[in-house]
Image (spheres, rainbow, N blue to C red):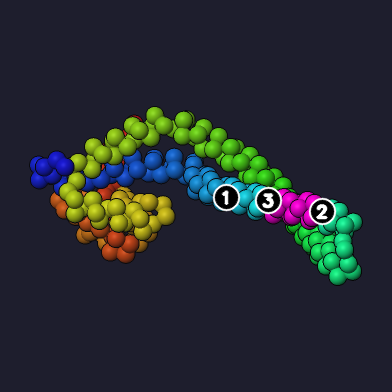
Amino acid sequence: MANVKDYSVEEKLSALVGLQKVESKIDEIQILKGELPMEVSDLEDEIQGLHSRQVRIEEEINGIQEFINQKKNMIKEAEALIKKYEKQSENVKNSREFEAINKEIEMQQLEIKLAEKHIRDANEEIAEKVVVLDKAKKNIATKEGVLSTKKGELEKIIATNEKEEKALNKQASEAREKVEERLLLSYDRIRKNYRNGLGVVPVERDACGGCFNAIPPQRQSEIRQRKKIIVCENCGRILVDRDLFDSVEVK
């Protein structure tokens, strides 16, 4: 920071007025952007969440498909065992062996029926998840379309105002160099307290240009003298006379 003690109160006030005017112009550019930066950020987060959900559903479908394949393999193994037992039944020596083989065949047939039921249930579950997955994909496509539009709008505003915004930011930095840190902190705090971002205002019709509270004549005289920093007793904004305010020009 520059050696602020080299600047008079009037110079500091002029710097503050210049800073206010510059930052008001920057505020206007931000207003042009509106809620777009936040909307773009929110959409990006939402789309990321939707992609994560899509991946999760796809993994679930793959898991169910793997389960189905396992059951199909079990059916093939059971069918092979049934053929094996049927062949063995041709060479049984007594009814006891025949009954034992029949029980094995019945067991494998039950395994097949149970596996087929599991496959049917799993296919139904896949069908339900495919519907959800399709909806998720369509939702992603819709959101990405909206995001693309909003990004385009934001980029257009940024591109249109980028040069001016850079110049204004440079002017703001230069103006800040002429104001002591304590005064800057006060100015920034005041700006944050009000939606219009006005921390420095002129006296208008014998009143504060920010809150319109009446300023006594003696106080107005002190403001015109520019010998000390004077703030509005009602809103806390820094007050300057109209001539000083109008004399500071911002390109």
Check disc 3 and give the amino acid type. Glu
Answer few, some or many: residues within 10 Å of disc 2's Cα (few below 14, many 20 plus, some between 14 and 19): few
| Predominant secondary structure, magenta span | helix
For disc 3, the marked residue is 66
**95 sits to left or right of 247:** right
The image position of residue 194, as x and y in percent, is: 38, 57
Query: Which circle, 2 or 3, is nearer the viewer?
Result: 2
Stretch in magenta: 66-81
The local secondary structure at tag 3 comes to helix
Q: Between residues 202 and 9, which one lies in front from this camera angle?
A: 9
Real-space Cα separation, disc 1 to disc 3, in angstroms: 21 Å
Please state the total of marks drawn on the protein image.
Answer: 3
In contact (CB < 8 Å): disc 1 and disc 2: no
Q: Between residues 146 and 216, which one lies in front from this camera angle?
A: 146
**57 sits to left or right of 249:** right
Give the label on residue 125, or none. none
For disc 1, the marked residue is 52
Rendered residue at 55%/34% (across/down): 152
Query: Which circle, 1 or 3, is nearer the viewer?
Result: 3
Q: Quadrant of residue 7?
A: top left
The image position of residue 157, as x and y in percent, is: 49, 35
